[in-house]
């Protein structure tokens, strides 16, 4: 039985090349996964869909099925994912002016709206639950319960896209 030295060398080179390629693949996969996850975790959360203040009247883009909050012409608007009543991240910061206004003697009025999809009864209940979630956020920020009014709007089914319609508005009144 004779072994050819060049065959052994080529097989060894192939095995080493394959091993290095496998290691490179594993390392690039791990690095790619870490970079991807860090990119997601450092990306702005739900409030990315619109600026915190929209005094320049730039059109606000609301993402479908993503909770967000914007302040537009003094009105704090909370947008909700379909079927959810979870207040968007950034909600407390957006309510800061409302809290200050209440401390200065005004009242906060909260109105809930819904979209046109699904059961009307369920939508009305969901709009109410969303308004109550925003009310709870205000109370948690130190606003007295008697300074917050839940007001059912005349037209609960709001205009605009479904994402724009699923909202709660907070305004200050004297």
Image: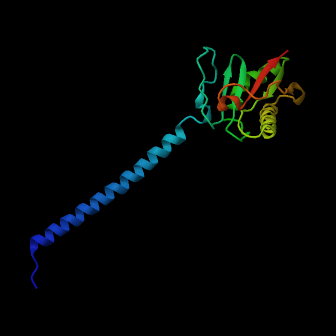
Residue found at the far right of this picture:
146
Nearer-the-camera pick, 1 or 84: 84
**What is the x, y in percent for residue 11?**
18, 69
**What is the x, y in percent for residue 54?**
63, 18
Nearer-the-camera pick, 67 or 136: 67
Tell me where residue 57 sits by quadrant.
Answer: top right
Q: Relative to residue 28, is residue 122 drawn left or right?
A: right
Q: Is residue 36 depicted above or below 153 in this figure? A: below
Q: How is the image coloured?
A: rainbow
Nearer-the-camera pick, 39 or 114: 114
Nearer-the-camera pick, 103 or 7: 7
Which residue is pictured at 68% across the width and 22% down the height?
71
Quarter holding the N terminus is bottom left
Q: Is residue 55 depicted above or below 68 in this figure? A: above
Q: Relative to residue 15, is residue 105 drawn left or right?
A: right
Residue found at the far bottom of this picture:
1
Which residue is pictured at 32% across the width and 60% down the height?
22
Which residue is pictured at 12% across the width and 71% down the height?
7
Q: Is residue 155 depicted above or below 12 in this figure? A: above
Which residue is pictured at 64% across the width and 20% down the height?
53
Tell me where residue 67 sits by quadrant.
Answer: top right
**What is the x, y in percent for residue 18?**
26, 62
**What is the x, y in percent for residue 28?**
36, 51
Tell me where residue 152 sits by quadrant.
Answer: top right
Quarter holding the C terminus is top right
Report the number of numbered marks. 0
């Amino acid at each position: 039985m004779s072994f050819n030295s060049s065959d052994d060398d080529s097989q060894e080179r192939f095995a080493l090349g394959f091993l290095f390629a496998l290691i490179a693949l594993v390392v690039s996969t791990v690095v790619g996964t870490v970079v991807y996850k860090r990119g997601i975790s450092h990306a702005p959360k739900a409030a990315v869909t619109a600026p915190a203040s929209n005094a320049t009247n730039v059109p606000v883009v609301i993402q479908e099925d993503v909770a967000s909050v914007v302040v537009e012409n003094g009105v704090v608007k909370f947008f909700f994912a379909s079927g959810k009543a979870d207040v968007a991240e950034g909600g407390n910061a957006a309510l800061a002016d409302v809290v200050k206004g209440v401390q200065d003697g005004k009242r906060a009025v909260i109105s809930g709206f819904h979209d046109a999809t699904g059961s009307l009864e369920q939508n009305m209940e969901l709009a109410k639950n969303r308004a109550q979630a925003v009310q709870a956020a205000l109370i948690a920020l130190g606003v007295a319960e008697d300074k917050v009014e839940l007001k059912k709007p005349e037209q609960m089914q709001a205009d605009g896209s479904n994402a724009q319609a699923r909202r709660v508005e907070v305004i200050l009144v004297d």
